[in-house]
Image (tube, rainbow, N blue to C red):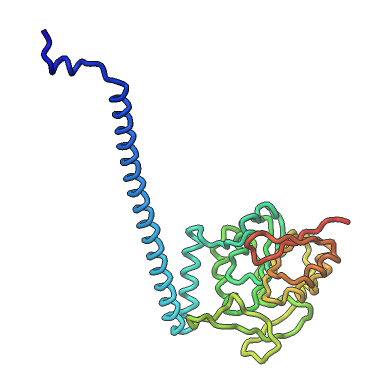
Amino acid sequence: MESADSAAEHAPVTRVEHNRAHVALRRHHRSVTSAQNVTTGVFRFITIYRERVEEEIRRMNLNLLKRLTSGLPLLWQQELKRLMYRHEIRHQKFESHEPEFLILSSMISAGDWVIDVGANIGHYTKRFSDLVGAQGRVIAVEPVPETFAIVSANVLLFQHSNVTLLNMAASDQPGIAGMQISRFETGLNNYYEAKLSKEKTDLHVLTVKLDALAFPHPIKLMKIDAEGHDPAVLRGAEALLARDHPILIVETGSSDVAEHLRGFGYTSEKLPGSPNTLFRWFPR
């Protein structure tokens, strides 16, 4: 004969008891899930906060380093830059984040000739060099002597020996022009925004029309970053535009430039987040 306890143990579970157990289980599950979500949220917050703190420290250290570097002799500054860019090139980190840079492989290919006006330290120059390959050619134009020295050192590290460097400024007239170089807040020279100027300056550079170079091969693409001197660069390359109709990447928002190029059959396009305007030629 079964005891009372045994009978209770084997008694069927009523629907009410079953529902109560189910509700309790769901509450427990929600409690566990909520705790997991809180833990995950806290972990994400800590991770994001840590990353932002680390980024701020890096930024502060970088600014401090720049301020310290600005007090060094120019030759020392140049050597530090050369070492930094060599590291970036060797570790595949030497690149631009501009939208056009990311789609260059759809514009040019092996064997093409490309012109880089305002090559600066050579971000675009390197990408052009990689894409056109050993049978192609990149003509890199950079007027500032200090920047030209850096891009010259960088080119020696490229995979292909297909870059022709020109220490001059592209313009619409041959001659000599002043070059104005501003400074960053850190005290370093801002070579990225160096520009031709009619004001009195300590630096003077040679100006040449691109048409005067009479390139023996069609130009597939031309990038122009001339800090407001773009109209003059284009006027000095009108024969080239009429002959080759190259794709143009121009750092400009000028309606005058767009109107000028429209006369050569070009249409303009502005990629999201880009400081440049992309011009393509279409036959009429």
Residue 245 coordinates in the image, percent (x, y): 80, 61
Q: Is residue 156 left or right of residue 114?
A: left
Instruction: Kindly give the residue lying farthest to the right in the view shown.
Output: 284
Q: Quadrant of residue 134?
A: bottom right
Q: Nearer the viewer, residue 2 or 136?
A: 2
- The quadrant of the image that shows the C terminus is bottom right
Q: Is residue 253 visible?
A: yes
Q: Residue furthest bottom?
A: 200
Please state, as top left, top right, bottom left or bottom right, where the N terminus lies in the image.
top left
Rendered view: 166 above or below 124: below
Q: Compared with residue 96, is residue 177 higher up or lower down, i.e. above or below?
A: below
Q: Is residue 45 left or right of residue 165?
A: left
Q: Residue at x 67, y 71 (%)?
A: 225
Can residue 128 be spotted in the picture?
A: no
Tally of numbered discs: 0
Q: Position of residue 254 (x, y in %)?
A: 74, 72
Q: Quadrant of residue 55?
A: bottom left
Q: Position of residue 185 (x, y in %)?
A: 50, 81
Furthest-top residue in view? 1
Task: Tell me where residue 26 sits by quadrant.
Answer: top left
- Residue located 73% across and 80% down the image: 207
Where residue 186 appears, as percent x and y from the top left, is 48, 81
Q: Residue at x 54, y 70 (%)?
A: 153
